[in-house]
């Protein structure tokens, strides 16, 4: 196993022990969880989605008070939104963080700002073309995210198994794999396909340190492989969420081809907050990825890291034996 992780590009670039990044998670990716993940040797990230600039500043300070290890910030780039106040907070606190991840929109015009602050820039992509563009624009790391992932995905809907080796072939910079990875086995598979590290979202929700409502965490424990679905296709979005009566209602509305303005009251961040933080799944919705069926307990972040690294080691050994057998 040491060989696989030796001279790892991600651990070197981010100054961390294990190439495991916390995916930005709207509403629940706070400073406490980011610090807990960094303290276990991963790379925690505070997600600005769902936070006011003031709250974001507080979460940055909180994370910095709970860890002396590197952590970062996730910023989904959307055309309709002004990020200036968040960028000011990042500039004022640039010593506290070591990298940002940019997702959702076109990151190219934003990259120089962060690079000039001395931060590493990671860009979340869903196609080879976007990976190439990110590299050309100066990104340090590409995070290729498959359609299995919880949260908002690329409209191209490529799955991770196909995406990793094609992105690996297309770019020189380090590649991180995201989507459907909840275990050491998944991590090993990503490394075998050519990734240098992994980004995990869904599995970190069912941890003791996550601020998500207990009933959301329990819902993940109780959910199976087919318990997620895609919302927002009718308005050009791809948002992977947990199935529920509420989400069924949204999908029915989408069948009526209603406009974005009409749909917005049902799919907005407030409705996500209701589900994620208050556990109100009658009036709100929550995200999860397809590997949710692998989650069978709510554990501490420390226990999760121990578990993932044990699984990685064991699956590496059995893979090795299996391949030896095949090659004989
Ligand atoms: C609850 C939740 C919220 C998310 N919010 C964001 C977000 O605000 N920004 C972002 O770039 N990705 C977001 N994602 C995607 C994650 O950063 C990550 O790439 C993804 O969860 C990886 O797939 P997995 O869920 O199968 O582990 C979210 C995912 C989840 C589960």
Image (spheres, helix red, strand yellow):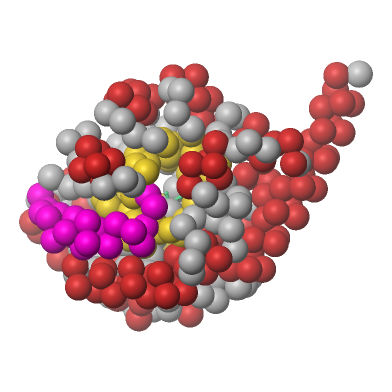
Q: Which quadrant is home to the N terminus?
A: top right
Q: Is residue 43 left or right of residue 328?
A: left
Q: Residue at x 74, y 36 (%)?
A: 3
Q: Residue at x 37, y 43 (%)?
A: 120
Q: Which stretch is magenta? A: 80-99
Q: Is residue 206 left or right of residue 325?
A: left
Residue 328, position as x, y percentages in the image: 91, 18
Nearer the observer, 275 or 22 = 22
Q: Residue at x 28, y 41 (%)?
A: 115
Q: Is residue 99 left or right of residue 249?
A: right
Residue 227, position as x, y percentages in the image: 49, 57
Where residue 57 sits, quadrant-wise, is bottom left
Nearer the observer, 321 or 85 = 85
Can residue 93 be seen in this snapshot? yes
Q: Is residue 25 magenta?
A: no
How many numbered marks appear? 0
In the rendered image, the vertical position of residue 46 relative to residue 14, given as above or below: below
In the rendered image, the vertical position of residue 105 relative to residue 281, given as above or below: above
Q: Is residue 1 left or right of residue 69?
A: right
Can residue 227 be seen in this snapshot? no
Q: Quadrant of ligand 1?
A: bottom left
Residue 110, position as x, y percentages in the image: 20, 41
In the rendered image, the vertical position of residue 284 relative to residue 85, given as above or below: below
In the rendered image, the vertical position of residue 64 relative to residue 19, given as above or below: below
Q: Residue at x 37, y 75 (%)?
A: 62
Residue 319, position as x, y percentages in the image: 79, 36
């Amino acid at each position: 196993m040491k060989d696989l992780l030796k001279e790892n590009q991600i651990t070197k670039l981010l100054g961390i022990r294990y190439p495991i990044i916390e995916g930005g998670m709207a509403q629940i990716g706070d400073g406490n969880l980011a610090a807990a993940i960094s303290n276990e040797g991963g790379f925690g990230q505070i997600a600005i989605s769902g936070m006011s600039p003031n709250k974001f500043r507080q979460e940055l300070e909180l994370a910095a008070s709970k860890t002396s290890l590197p952590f970062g910030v996730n910023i989904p780039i959307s055309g309709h939104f002004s990020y200036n106040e968040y960028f000011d907070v990042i500039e004022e606190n640039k010593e506290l963080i070591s990298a940002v991840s940019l997702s959702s929109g076109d990151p190219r015009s934003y990259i120089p700002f962060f690079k000039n602050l001395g931060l590493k820039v990671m860009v979340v992509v869903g196609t080879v073309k976007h990976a190439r563009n990110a590299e050309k624009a100066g990104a340090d790391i590409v995070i290729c995210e498959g359609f299995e992932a919880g949260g908002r995905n690329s409209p191209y809907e490529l799955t991770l198994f196909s995406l990793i080796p094609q992105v690996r072939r297309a770019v020189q910079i380090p590649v991180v794999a995201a989507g459907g990875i909840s275990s050491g086995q998944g991590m090993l598979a990503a490394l075998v396909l050519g990734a240098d590290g992994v980004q995990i979202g869904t599995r970190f929700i069912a941890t003791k340190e996550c601020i998500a409502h207990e009933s959301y965490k329990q819902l993940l424990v109780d959910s199976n492989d087919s318990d997620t679905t895609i919302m927002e296709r009718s308005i050009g979005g791809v948002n992977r969420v947990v199935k529920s009566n509420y989400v069924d209602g949204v999908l029915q509305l989408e069948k009526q081809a209603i406009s974005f303005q009409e749909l917005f009251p049902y799919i907005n961040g407030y409705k996500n907050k209701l589900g994620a933080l208050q556990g109100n799944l009658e009036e709100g919705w929550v995200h999860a990825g397809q590997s949710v069926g692998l989650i069978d307990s709510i554990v501490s972040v420390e226990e999760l890291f121990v578990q993932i690294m044990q699984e990685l080691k064991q699956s590496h050994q059995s893979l090795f034996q299996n391949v030896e057998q095949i090659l004989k």
